[in-house]
Image: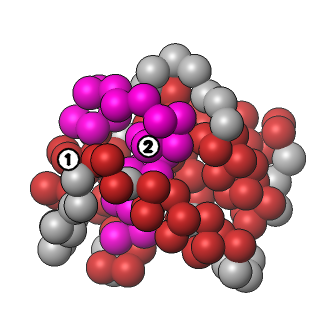
């Protein structure tokens, strides 16, 4: 979950503004990880690459969660930002079994799916 949090933050900050649902999703990650702001900052300072995160998430379920969460963060502010889309597409191409992503206009589904997954996640 820590790796997904780290990469999700990269997607959220790609447009230099973290707001609305992006903040909510990242806050929920902190709750799930049971960390405070200082601990979150230390984790995010590790600056792991997307490629490294994917290699460390060897099971398909974790890799799918990463991609769907990246989609959720890319869509959460409602602005299509090409750098975020490119990050998602590049990551998706690198996982064991790439997902057949739905069109960006419908990525709200990934926001809902990620929110639900985090709501019921047990640390």
Establish if 82 lies above or below 76.
Answer: above
Left or right of 76, for residue 84:
left
Q: Are marks 2 and 1 in contact (CB under 8 Å)?
A: no
Depth-wise, is mark 2 or mark 1 nearer the camera? 2
Which quadrant of the structure image shows residue 119?
A: bottom right
Which residue is rendered at x = 42% and y = 41% of the image?
Answer: 74
Residue 2 lies, in percent from the top left, at 58, 58
Give the quarter of the figure containing the C terminus. bottom right
Which residue is rendered at x = 34% and y = 70% of the image?
Answer: 64
Left or right of 28, for residue 68:
left
In the rendered image, is residue 11 in sight?
A: yes
Magenta residue span: 64-86
What SS does tag 1 mark?
helix
Q: CA distance from mark 2 to mark 1?
A: 13 Å
Residue 54 lies, in percent from the top left, at 31, 59
Which residue is rendered at x = 71% and y = 47% of the image?
Answer: 24
Residue 109 within the magenta-colored segment of the rendering:
no
């Amino acid at each position: 979950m820590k790796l997904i949090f780290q990469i999700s933050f990269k997607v959220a900050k790609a447009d230099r503004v973290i707001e609305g649902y992006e903040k909510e999703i990242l806050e929920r990650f902190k709750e799930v990880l049971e960390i405070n702001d200082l601990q979150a900052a230390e984790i995010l300072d590790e600056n792991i690459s997307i490629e490294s995160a994917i290699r460390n998430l060897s099971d398909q379920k974790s890799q799918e969660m990463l991609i769907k969460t990246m989609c959720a963060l890319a869509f959460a502010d409602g602005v299509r930002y090409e750098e975020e889309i490119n990050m998602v597409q590049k990551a998706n191409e690198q996982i064991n079994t790439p997902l057949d992503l739905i069109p960006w206009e419908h990525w709200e589904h990934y926001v809902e799916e990620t929110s639900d997954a985090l709501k019921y996640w047990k640390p």
